[in-house]
């Protein structure tokens, strides 16, 4: 299929008037607004199953989800076997990822540092409705059911010609099944063309809403033998840290270092935040962009990346394999570029050709 290719290698809303409305007389904007307000406050426990197609590979991943609210949740990977037991937790708006076999955990990071995982497994439609409306056509399909729950079905597709080509979309379209009772996303499909099988489909196979007072316990109790790598704010004489900034100018002012951003971006994409991570002698920059729906991550590092060996020791090879397995099951395309001094990896909801242009436009001195 032309241009259908997936490569291997990890608020507020503005209401608008619309003539489309179904049950409960809610407009699309009201449904999506509720998904980001009411939907983030309903506690539940469930099992999420996602299918990802990569050329001739059909991959299945399963995760148990315990959810209190958007600032307190726990995701436990159950399959494939390569990632079994990995925990990702947000507790009191700080994130943690635990690799039990390697007895290693990265702790105390800002919650948004895990958006790549939560956006995929929990699902998120948008955090800026005007940008979504600018770049996408939004419509309601007939109601449907997931696990006996009545759902709104919201279809979102890229506007034709947005990227200067009327023959194909520059980004994937998505369809969301949103629970009418509590506005949580029960299912998400992603596809590159109308009428074809989704290359990614994520749906709850078990789902139990809970009252807030009966919400699940989400805090991970790390064994005493676990090595903890703290990824909090930068401190004196600390070799690891993770901080989040909104602009390159803010980074330059506070850290006295220059950060490069791509000079080429597909139409409609906007810089959301920049993560600056320091692992011993390795500094990693991760820049997050989106266009109101789809995501783009641009990462680069300028020194040998030996932090895995330092932190995981003899477990560094299986840890790298786990990170690769997580990336393989994520619904993103990946593209890398290596120079004498830098390694650049861009990934997200874009064609590899666009990711190549983004990498080539990053001017690293």
Image (tube, rainbow, N blue to C red):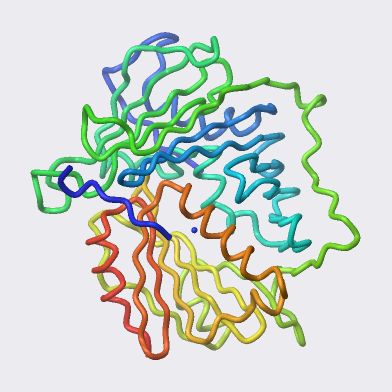
Q: Position of residue 154 (x, y in %)?
A: 36, 25
Tag count: 0
> In the depicted view, which residue is nearer to us: 8 or 281?
8
Q: Is residue 15 above or below residue 85?
A: above
Q: Position of residue 134 (x, y in %)?
A: 26, 43
Q: Looking at the figure, which quarter contains the N terminus?
A: top left
**Residue lying farthest to the left in this orientation:** 166
Left or right of 182: which side holds 75?
A: right
The residue sitting at 68% across, 62% down in the picture is 109
The residue sitting at 76% across, 86% down in the picture is 236
Q: Is residue 194 above or below residue 181?
A: below
Q: Is residue 87 above or below residue 51?
A: below
Left or right of 148: which side holds 343?
A: left
Q: Position of residue 265 (x, y in %)?
A: 27, 64
> In the depicted view, which residue is nearer to us: 314 or 158?
314
Residue 69 in which image quadrant: top right
Left or right of 354: which side holds 69?
A: right
**Residue lying farthest to the right in this orientation:** 224
């Amino acid at each position: 299929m032309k241009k259908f290719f997936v490569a291997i290698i990890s608020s507020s809303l503005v209401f608008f008037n619309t003539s489309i409305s179904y049950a409960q007389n809610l407009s699309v904007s009201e449904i999506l607004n509720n998904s980001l307000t009411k939907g983030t406050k309903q506690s539940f426990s469930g099992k999420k199953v996602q299918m990802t197609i990569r050329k001739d590979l059909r991959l299945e991943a399963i995760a148990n989800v315990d959810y209190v609210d958007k600032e307190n949740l726990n995701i436990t990977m159950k399959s494939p076997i390569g990632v079994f037991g990995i925990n990702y937790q947000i507790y009191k708006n700080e994130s943690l990822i635990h690799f039990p076999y390697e007895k290693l955990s990265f702790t105390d990071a800002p919650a948004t540092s895990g958006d790549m995982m939560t956006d995929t497994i929990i699902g998120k439609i948008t955090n800026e409705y005007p940008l979504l409306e600018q770049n996408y056509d939004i419509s309601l399909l007939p109601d449907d059911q997931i696990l006996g729950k009545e759902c709104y079905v919201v279809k979102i597709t890229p506007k034709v010609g947005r990227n200067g080509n009327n023959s194909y979309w520059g980004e994937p379209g998505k369809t969301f099944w949103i629970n009418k009772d509590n506005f949580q996303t029960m299912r998400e499909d992603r596809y590159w063309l109308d009428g074809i099988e989704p290359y990614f489909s994520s749906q709850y196979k078990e789902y139990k809403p809970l009252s807030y007072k009966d919400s699940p316990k989400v805090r991970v109790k790390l064994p005493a033998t676990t090595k903890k790598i703290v990824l909090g704010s930068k401190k004196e004489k600390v070799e690891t840290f993770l901080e989040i900034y909104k602009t390159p100018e803010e980074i330059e002012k506070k850290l006295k270092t220059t950060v490069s951003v791509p000079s080429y971006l597909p139409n409609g994409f906007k810089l959301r935040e920049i993560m600056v991570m320091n692992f011993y002698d390795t500094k990693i920059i991760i820049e997050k962009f989106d266009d109101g729906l789809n995501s783009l991550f641009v990462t680069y590092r300028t020194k040998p990346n030996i932090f895995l060996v330092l932190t995981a020791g003899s477990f560094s090879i299986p840890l790298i394999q786990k990170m690769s397995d997580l990336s393989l099951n994520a619904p993103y395309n990946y593209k890398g570029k290596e120079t004498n001094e830098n390694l650049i990896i861009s990934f997200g909801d874009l064609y590899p050709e666009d990711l190549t242009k983004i990498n080539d436009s990053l001017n690293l001195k």
